[in-house]
Amino acid sequence: MPEVLKAPLVVEFPFTRSLGPVQSAFLSGLRERTVLGVRTSDGKVLVPPVEYDPVTADEIRELVEVGATGTVTTWAWNHEPRRGQPLAKPFAWVLVTLDGADTALLHALDAEGPDAVHSGMRVRIRWAGERSGAITDIACFEPYDGDERTEAAPHDGRFEDPVSGIVAPARLDYTYSPGRAQSAYIEAVADRRMVGERCPSCAKVYIPPRGACPTCGVATREAVEVGPRGTVTTFCIVNVKAKNLDIELPYVYAHIALDGADLALHGRIAGIPYDQVRMGLRVEPVWTEGGRYPDHYRPTGEPDADYDTYKELV
């Protein structure tokens, strides 16, 4: 049995979104050290604010200002902070009901240790030194010994230069293991062979293999070498450059049914003008020196495949 592979994998992208009037007012308020909530039809104050009542689904716009102090309702100790979290040292994640609010806000609490945290403790906002109109304008919460409490007060939500949109970086770090079937596939590709697996029930050959037939649900074990030539079944023309991908635009990405396979895999098409790529085009893989997988697929020069030979794979 081949060694099961694993490798670190990072999925990262900037998430950009525009803001409606409620969220715009909330984030603009944080920039000005003001916390806004929204009042529902039954009088409850929601912080963070939402634009639609979670019970009635009615649109809600009545903004109110709540306090910068509040009460911890529940908490969990984070003994090993990760990259991008509010504090670099161990801290508590807390749900804080701010004075004047009826719902809790999730954020970090700067505390000496888990013994210094308890539900019901009073805390206050520690504002960031530089604020831009984001949840990170609240640097964290800190313990508060005062007794003063703030009641919710009406607020018009107007601020100079209101925040109209945000860019939130999204990132997921994890270790990926492709499993037995795909590990064998990856090792074969590195040896410039395209190997799938056959279903013992329906006899279809799947590449890349998943270890089980997606139609019959039974395990697959029989290795079957396919291709390496194949047929373009569908394709798209890419006109947007991806970060860290040094490929001249435009280029073509296609689904390719390798000869002998019953599932199309995807790959880039090169060696032909992008506007000449077509369904039925016969192609073959091209490896670069030292490459562990095909760099791209190029035309073989054969006549185009008849549609009836690949229509089930479109």
Image (cartoon, rainbow, N blue to C red):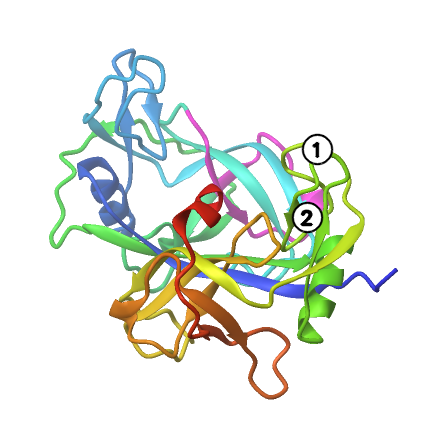
Q: Residue at x 66, y 43 (%)?
A: 204
In the drawing, does residue 69 fall left or right of residue 203? left
The vertical placement of 167 against 282, above or below, is above
**Disc 2 on helix, strand or loop?**
loop
Q: Position of residue 75 (x, y in %)?
A: 61, 37
Q: Residue at x 25, y 13 (%)?
A: 41
**Disc 1 on helix, strand or loop?**
loop
Question: What amino acid type should be assigned to the residue bearing mark 1?
Answer: Gly
Residue 120 in the magenta stretch? The answer is yes
Q: Residues within 10 Å of mark 2 (few under 14, many from 20)?
A: some
Give the magenta part as a residue range: 103-123
Query: Which quadrant would the N terminus be assigned to in this image?
Result: bottom right
Residue receiving disc 1: 217
Question: Is residue 40 or residue 270 the one in the foreground?
Answer: 270
The disc placed on residue 152 is none
In the drawing, does residue 249 fall left or right of residue 218? left
In the drawing, does residue 75 fall left or right of residue 99? right
Q: Residue at x 39, y 80 (%)?
A: 246
Question: Is residue 262 or residue 300 the one in the foreground?
Answer: 300
Residue receiving disc 2: 210
The vertical placement of 127 against 102, above or below, is below
Whether residue 214 is visible, yes or no, is yes
Q: Position of residue 126 (x, y in %)?
A: 43, 52
